[in-house]
Amino acid sequence: MNFTRNNNIGSLRLIGALMVLWGHTYNLFGGNQGHFMYDPLSTYIEPISPYGLPVASLGVNLFFSISGYLIANSFIRSNNLPAFIASRILRIYPALIVTITLTVLIVGGVFTSLPIWEYLSSGATWSYFLSNSLLLDNVRFFLPGVFEDLPFAGAVNGSLWSLPLELYFYFLVGVFGYLGLLNKSSLFNGFLLLFFFIANGLGLFEHDLFQKNYIVAAIWSFIFGTFLCVNRESISINKQGILLLLLFSWLSFGSEYYDFVSNFTFTYIVLWFGFLTPFLGIRLDAKGDFSYGVYLYAMPIQQILIHFKVSDYPALLALYAFLLTLCVAVLSWKLVEEPALAKRNELASKLSYLGERIDILRDFIYKKISIRWGSEQ
């Protein structure tokens, strides 16, 4: 399937963010004190979904499926490491840092049960800020005294868990692209086959390695998306492929490989639908890509609505949360994300210049070492 700009990818990403919001509304409403609640759709989906994922986790899976394809395609098209790094930095960090700053200062400052000075001087507060802004350490999910009286006590923004994993895959795609593996499907497939056997030996298919089925599913979804991108010349994404994969999924149902096969099928279907021309020309991203903003801001807004007891009905609460979150996401896109992405070429140029200086320094050091080594022989 050929990649075109007129597609459903942006619409799917927004739908994925809404799936996460929908599922999390029920989770937060039910709480973490022995009354954990799933949304009603997950009751029907979990028995047949990859790794038994509920709706919210399938939304994350959708993100990773699309991301695996698009991120690899981004490097292949530009074949420029500085440009790739610049795009990834500006897509992830500006909106994230603004979100974390607003969460710490406004949400935390207003809803903490601690005296404001005690809250602001707490090491946990600034650990939350630094760890979640940089994504170089484990994500922090709690702020001192914030939302501690809610059913899902203390949860500020659990959705952030996926961002370090996404960043890690950006790094791997950059390395693979720099080494030329993304343009050589045979080498990439050989490496992936090796990884497949190692992962099978480690029990990754049975999600024993991480003890979290949604993490394993997200990992495979990204890998599958990248695989389909690298092999796009030899593997078509079409209706016939969907029917064949659905057959394989049905045949493997109940076996140890069902999760793996159905996860690949899920990724394949997502990409097939994503690259279709929009029905009646309707694109949910026509005015901007609001999916990242929805993903970032949804949970704090949901917890605020639960705090004020806006509704006793989770479905209605999800609707209110969506409307408020979408408004914030639009502002995030217009004021933060879109202006940041406009700086891609400028940042890429600076990174390219820095890379050239590093290469010069490296060559100088190698030359000095060679001269010294030669003189000692």
Image (cartoon, helix red, strand yellow):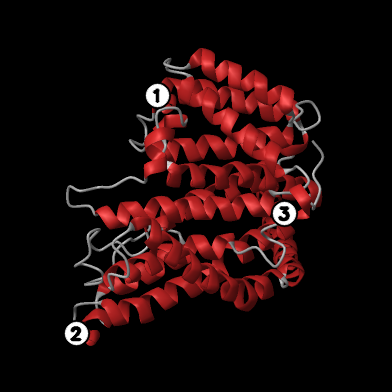
Q: On the image, which quarter does residue 207 sit in? A: top left
Label 1 – label 2 distance at C-alpha? 48 Å
Label 2 – label 3 distance at C-alpha? 47 Å
Mark 2 vs 3, N-terminal side: 3
Category of crowding for the residue at label 3, using alpha-carbon neighbours closer than 10 angstroms: few (below 14), some (14–19), many (at least 20): some
**Residue drawn 22% across the image and 64% down it:** 150
Q: Which residue is mark 1?
A: 203
Looking at the rendered structure, the secondary structure element under dot 1 is: loop
- Residue type, numbered disc 2: Pro
Location of the C terminus (image quadrant): top right
CB within 8 Å, label 2 to label 3: no
Residue 115 shows which numbered tag? 2
**Residue drawn 30% across the image and 57% down it:** 28
Task: Name the spot of residue 23 as percent of width and height, x first.
Answer: 40, 50
Q: Return the residue nearer the eye: 69 or 185.
A: 69
CB within 8 Å, label 1 to label 2: no
Task: Name the spot of residue 294 as percent of width and height, x first.
Answer: 52, 63
Q: Return the residue nearer the eye: 8 or 351.
A: 8
Q: On the image, which quarter does residue 156 sit in? A: bottom left
Please tell me whether mark 1 or mark 2 is closer to you in this view: 2
**Residue drawn 44% across the image and 43% down it:** 55
Q: Which residue is mark 3?
A: 81
